[in-house]
Amino acid sequence: MRVLDDAGQPLPGASVTVAQTRHAFSFGNIGFDFLPRAGGDPDHHAHEDVETFGGGTGRQLERLEHLEALWLDLYNTATLPFYWGRFEPERGRPDTARLRAAAQRFADRGVTVKGHPLVWHTVTAPWLLDLPVAEVEQAQRERIRRDVGDFAGLIDTWDAINEAVIMPVFDNGDNGITRMARELGRIPTVRLAFEEARRTNPGATLLINDFDLGSAYECLIEGVLEAGVQIDAIGLQTHMHQGYRGEDAVLAVVDRFARFGLPLHMTETTIVSGHLMPPEIEDLNDYQIDEWPSTPEGEERQADELVRHYRSLVSHPSVQAVNYWGLSDDGAWLGAPVGLVRADGTVKPSYTAVHDLIKGEWWMPPTTLVADAEGVVRFRGFAGEYEATARGGRTVVLSFPNPGPTRIDVRLPSSSGVDAASDLL
Amino acid sequence: MRVLDDAGQPLPGASVTVAQTRHAFSFGNIGFDFLPRAGGDPDHHAHEDVETFGGGTGRQLERLEHLEALWLDLYNTATLPFYWGRFEPERGRPDTARLRAAAQRFADRGVTVKGHPLVWHTVTAPWLLDLPVAEVEQAQRERIRRDVGDFAGLIDTWDAINEAVIMPVFDNGDNGITRMARELGRIPTVRLAFEEARRTNPGATLLINDFDLGSAYECLIEGVLEAGVQIDAIGLQTHMHQGYRGEDAVLAVVDRFARFGLPLHMTETTIVSGHLMPPEIEDLNDYQIDEWPSTPEGEERQADELVRHYRSLVSHPSVQAVNYWGLSDDGAWLGAPVGLVRADGTVKPSYTAVHDLIKGEWWMPPTTLVADAEGVVRFRGFAGEYEATARGGRTVVLSFPNPGPTRIDVRLPSSSGVDAASDLL
């Protein structure tokens, strides 16, 4: 960064304080817990019988306040739930206002918000059950247009479709979406999700997302791309209730999907801090136990594994996002101790360890630098946003969206006022 | 069938002998064993170091004669090997003459011949190894045109591509085809196989074939069809060295693939008559033992399971072919006792049991029928070809390619001469 005065002359010896304010890399977690906090109706607990996938309900607001502070200190991207069966249990009465309030609350705190998912065969709207497939498709298309439209500008990243690999064949009880996918086929179902979302919000980042990390998902993606559907990022789930798979296995998967030349988002990450789910369980949902405690040994292991996981993923050029699935054990999916915070609100070693990475080792705190004879200060940090402040003078925002060396000229006299940075390259 | 005289008048009371001569359903087996018998060079055993997938080599011709008689008495479709690395180990010296002789010998005996496979990443031509991908693709395209062209009329059914699901990702050592598939992608690789074969022999029946029977293969097929590639039949392998999967499991798979509305060929069927391969083996090729004996209990089980397997498959409207993978244990793939004939040439219970089905319960032997007052004789049998012979008179060939009721007029006076049947419907 070259420091200039208002006349454009370099300022040798100028003293500038640089501080990172945001990572370009998306470090995310679900924000399901905070719907009650988001204004609107804190006692909104309608349809408790409909399955959720994380996020406690009915918590006291003061406990949520504490959890929210921990959340905001670590993450920059929140995933909010748009499971159709919960979002619109009665046709025509969508939960839009409450979700908008929750999204807005995150946005106001500088957090990017993502919606999950627009099409899925689980937690489907019950009123689809009696409709013929053509009307299910019509309702699905309208739902996408409505919700993507209602949230445009606030939510511009969507899991357009979730788990399309098994969508037409998974035995999920009778429901409208499985029937639709079986009749249309996978690729037309994926196409309709992307088509409606893209038309409604052309600038949105639209993902295909799956837990299948093998040839089936590769084949589906090939077919979808061959059919001309534009995917913006590939979502890879990694719920590791049966144990951390290790850097090599995870990176091998990442490499296989990197072949498509698209950004990869690790959309659903979990590592338990208790005993592991037995390896013979095929569908994680089949393991339901009364209590799944977090243990001291498990917490040490989880912290270690999460650090290894983040290190390996952040090092891969195709990976642009790692989203964790639940901050607190309270309300965690399947009752598993996957949180970085215990159910009582105290932090586990994993919270501290991941925080030490994201906001420590990978983060540039306010650092005072002195310009050389050409007025240049050099610093090295993660892609993202920074603020530079002249001693006693103005502050400018510096944006480095991509990794790699960048040169920038900044007018930063030691005076008052705020200016925008002009990018040299 | 209405029996008419040469003037077209019904012949009430006419006596006609009807006999089935062929099943429309394809009951097949590999014919790899008989290459030495097919004329040409019986001592042709070049490149013994290259892997084979069934078929003994170097057998005495008299033993082959016995085996061939058993083969011809049971099956109507032979699969011949076109593994590129064996077929053309030196570039420009394909094994065409010997394969033509083998195919011709089958064809002369009324057997339909199928070629397997045109594109596969195993047993690839070694000389592809040093070529850049564009030249591998060029050589692959030329190979398809040459071989499909050389055998047109003799072989009009081809496995155009084998195991495309894992083709770009299976660790098979460095070879030209894996490299090509990785660079082109699965769908363009499938497309090139079908495109070249179709262009060369537009009337051919072209299959995609795989051992993957899950979502990956479904996704690939969806993508290939979506990309506009015309598949004539879907090939499903069922090597059951680890045990018969049972009617329900097999029919569930068949139903999943029947959804595409295409004929299904069970291309590679095996059931062992000895101990089962342990269930933890993932790649069948990884189980190599010195001796894998056929046992009396195993032979009874195999006979029972094969009958159940054939019954369930033949009952399914989408299944048009069941091809078994090896008649004799001598030279069987992986050394497994999958044959219907023991290595010493004696038949196992499975041979007798399957023969009792295909040429017994499902077969119409010469049967004398007497026409009613309208000159009509009624009979019920499997789709296929039949001969009808008037007493002391001519013989006509009756063709019933599809299941379902058919009415046919046949001029069958009790005189000499042969006439063609004219189909009423």
Image (cartoon, coloured by chain):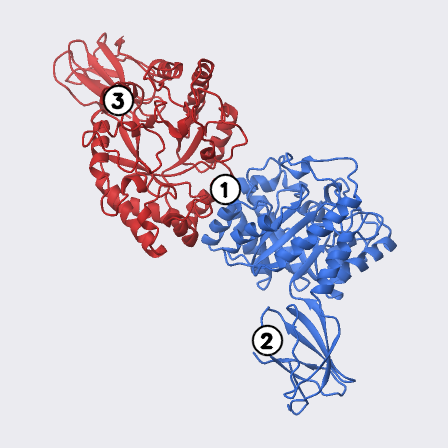
Chain colours: A red, B blue
Q: Is mark 1 on a helix, strand or loop?
A: helix
Tag 1 residue:
A216
Q: How many discs mark residues in the rendered view? A: 3
Image point (48%, 35%), residue name:
A283
User: What is the distance, in whole Å, between disc 2 and disc 1 at their CAs?
Assistant: 43 Å
From the viewer's perspective, tell me whether residue B288 is left or right of residue A262: right
Q: In which quarter of the image is the N terminus of chain A?
A: top left
Q: Nearer the viewer, residue B96 or B289?
A: B289
Q: In which quarter of the image is residue A397?
A: top left
Asked if badges 2 and 3 are on one and the same chain, I answer no
Image: A415 above or below A46:
above
Mark 1 closeness class: few <14, some 14–19, many ≥20 residues within 10 Å:
many
Among the 4 quarters of the image, the one containing residue B175: top right
- Quadrant of the rendering where the C terminus of chain A is positioned: top left
Residue A149 at x, y = what percent? 23, 43
Q: Which residue is drawn at 12% across and 14% down?
A: A416
Q: Is residue B141 visible?
A: no
* SS under mark 3: helix
Residue at image position (65%, 68%) is B382
Give the labeled residue for mark 2: B406
The residue singled out by tag 3 in the image is A64
State the image coordinates of residue B101 (x, y, percent, origin top left).
76, 59
For badge 3, the amino acid type reads Leu
